[in-house]
Image (cartoon, coloured by chain):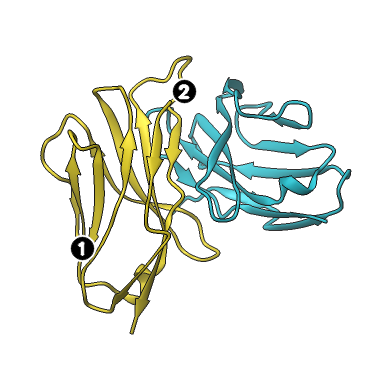
Chain colours: A cyan, B yellow
Amino acid sequence: EAEVAQSPRYKITEKSQAVAFWCDPISGHATLYWYRQILGQGPELLVQFQDESVVDDSQLPKDRFSAERLKGVDSTLKIQPAELGDSAMYLCASSKDSYNEQFFGPGTRLTVL
Amino acid sequence: AQTVTQSQPEMSVQEAETVTLSCTYDTSESDYYLFWYKQPPSRQMILVIRQEAYKQQNATENRFSVNFQKAAKSFSLKISDSQLGDAAMYFCAYRGIYSGAGSYQLTFGKGTKLSVIP
């Protein structure tokens, strides 16, 4: 069964460093989502792509976060510089289109020291 | 803005027994979707069940069923014949029909941690 792939699974970094996360959605899924899940909370949407275009990035802290999906397939989420408050699980999800069921990846757990 | 509230941070159930997880939400929309997601430890989140607000019939998926009370804005999940594999975080989520600019954003509650006692 096709799954959403994410790497790395775990990342430890020091504050002020740059980090990057990668997501490979299920083949054929046009919509890709990045969520942040702080410990003890539900996921919160950071950015949504439809193919290569950003549809919603209203909750993305644009001073330090950036996301791209250049060819409309895989995607990278970057944080520069990382802050202590960025420690969280970063989840990627994909769906056939924006109104279809979202399938989640295993997430990247980021710890900022 | 829509909000989703799960008032039970933790629940436990004896194996083979039934447990109900609570969820309430707030919205001004008349049509929307509601979901329950399961997040096992160190594993990806998966969809358990979904309910379309315009459907009066409660959704059922094998041992999982919902009690959807639209007027009360309540959406509880019942797990029957609980199994050890049901132990996980459970998240209630809301999604509007249309959120503008093609965005169908999921709004999640804070989750309920379910433990299953052998």
Q: Is residue A40 visible?
A: yes
Q: Residue at x 67, y 57 (%)?
A: A9
Kindly identify the residue that appears in the image at 37 percent across and 58 percent down.
B8
Residue positioned 48% across, 14% down in the render:
B101
Please give the name of the residue rendered at 52% of the width and 61% of the height, measured from the top-left corner: B43
Q: Quadrant of the C terminus of chain A?
A: bottom right
Q: Nearer the viewer, residue B113 or B37?
A: B113
> Callout 2 environment at 10 Å: few (<14), some (14 to 19), or many (20+)?
many
Q: Chain of mark 2?
A: B
The amino acid marked with disc number 1 is Arg
Give the Cα separation between the discs numbered 1 and 2. 32 Å
Is A75 placed above or below B16 here?
A: above
Residue B16 shown left or right of residue B112 in the figure: left
Query: Looking at the image, which is closer to me, A74 or B27?
Result: B27
| x then y, percent, for residue A48 | 56, 28
Judged left or right of residue B76, residue B84 is right
Residue A101 visible in the snapshot = no
Give, as a three-letter code, the residue at label 2.
Ser
The residue at which mark 2 appears reads as: B103
**Residue picked out by circle 1:** B63
Decide which of tag 1 and tag 2 comes sooner along the chain: 1
Q: Position of residue B111 (x, y in %)?
A: 43, 53
Query: For the view shown, which residue lies furthest in the bottom direction?
Result: B118
| Residue A14 shown left or right of residue A29 in the figure | right
User: Does dot 1 land on a helix, a strand or a loop?
Assistant: loop
Chain under label 1? B
**Secondary structure beneath label 2:** loop
